[in-house]
Amino acid sequence: MSGRRTGSPTAIKITDVADAAGVAPMTVSRVINTPDRVSAPTRLKVQAAIDKLGYVPNLIAGGLSSRRSRMVAAIVPTIASPMFAGPVQSFTDTLGAAGYRVMLALSGYDPATDAELIRAVLARRPDALLLTGAQRSPAATRLLREAQVPVVEIWDAAETPTDMLVGFDHALLGAAVADYFIGRGHTEFAVLAASDPRGMARADGFARRVRALGLPIHVGPPLPAPSGIADGRVGLRALVPQMRGRTALLCSSDLVAFGALTEARLLGLSVPDQLAVCGFGNFEISQSCEPPFTTVAVDGVAMGRIAAECLLQRLAGEPTETRVLVPFEILTRGST
């Protein structure tokens, strides 16, 4: 006997779903593409037929006529850090409630590859893009302008965003932490930062404010991006020989801060009497470790929600804010 197949499954069509649900094919199309325009009972009936038949709509083909794929692409550096979880989740939830799906892509921290990734994402014909940060290569900027789709950048505060921006000023945040430490009587400072643009901006803002007052600051070795607990331990070991007295340390993330605190305990440094530590991100670890440590909280959930709302307004042809800044807050805990 030969191995030739005598038959193959027949692809389920939109008309099959319409027959099963007892509605017109146009109604099925609306449930898929503009669910807000269909009554809840009809929407549930059509969705039940879709689930029963295993129908998979060709959203790209459908978008050729409507010019809408109902898909938005989100590009973030990593999912290894809790820092981006809140914004991505709230962004996805807000768009999902409006009938959009989010395609997630990871960029890493190498700016040389941003154009290649953006080109690959745009080839999937998303209706809009979310990008992390506002620094990118000229080639990537050109691609975004030529694509003519709404773009929102988060986690930055550039004066001239590509299109829309929802974020905060990292250098200003670093300076605010310096002022916080100075207000608590510190006269010697140190910083440990990852080598990504935003971590470096926070470190630079912190260092510039300290140096402007003529106070000493020790800058630790550049940490890899993203940085973790082990990097914080290595960084503190490199800083300790430079420390001459009670030191106030800013870390570029809560994971780095936790690593620094772990190493401080092993080295016999008293916290906060000899070493005061401030992290960034308000991760769960900042509250649950001993002692709980001071950190800077940014409302990432609000950032993601506002970014999604800006895109939805633009997609609906409504006017939008081009630059929205979210606040940050220093949360005082036992490490300072």
Image (tube, rainbow, N blue to C red):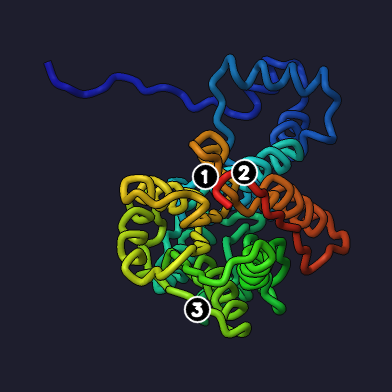
Tell me if label 1 and label 2 are in contact, CB under 8 Å. Answer: yes
Note whether 196 is above or below 53 in the view shown: below
> In percent of the image, x 32 and y 51: which residue is there?
267
Instruction: Return the mark for residue 216.
Output: 3
Q: Which amino acid type corresponds to the residue marked 3 in the rendered image? A: Pro
Using the numbered discs, state the Cα–Cα distance from disc 1 to disc 3 in whole angstroms: 32 Å
Mark 2 or mark 3: name the one nearer the start of the chain: 2
Along the line of sight, which residue is nearer the eye, 117 or 20?
A: 117
Which type of secondary structure does the marked residue at label 2 adopt? helix
Q: Which amino acid type corresponds to the residue marked 1 in the rendered image? A: Pro
Query: Crowding near pointer 2: few (<14 within 10 Å), some, many (20+)?
Result: some
For discs 1 and 3, the disc positioned in front in the rendered view: 3
Please, which residue is most extreme toward the left here?
1
Along the line of sight, which residue is nearer the eye, 56 or 95?
A: 95
Using the numbered discs, state the Cα–Cα distance from disc 2 to disc 3 in whole angstroms: 36 Å
Instruction: Return the mark for residue 86.
Output: 2
> In percent of the image, x 52 and y 56: which residue is there?
276
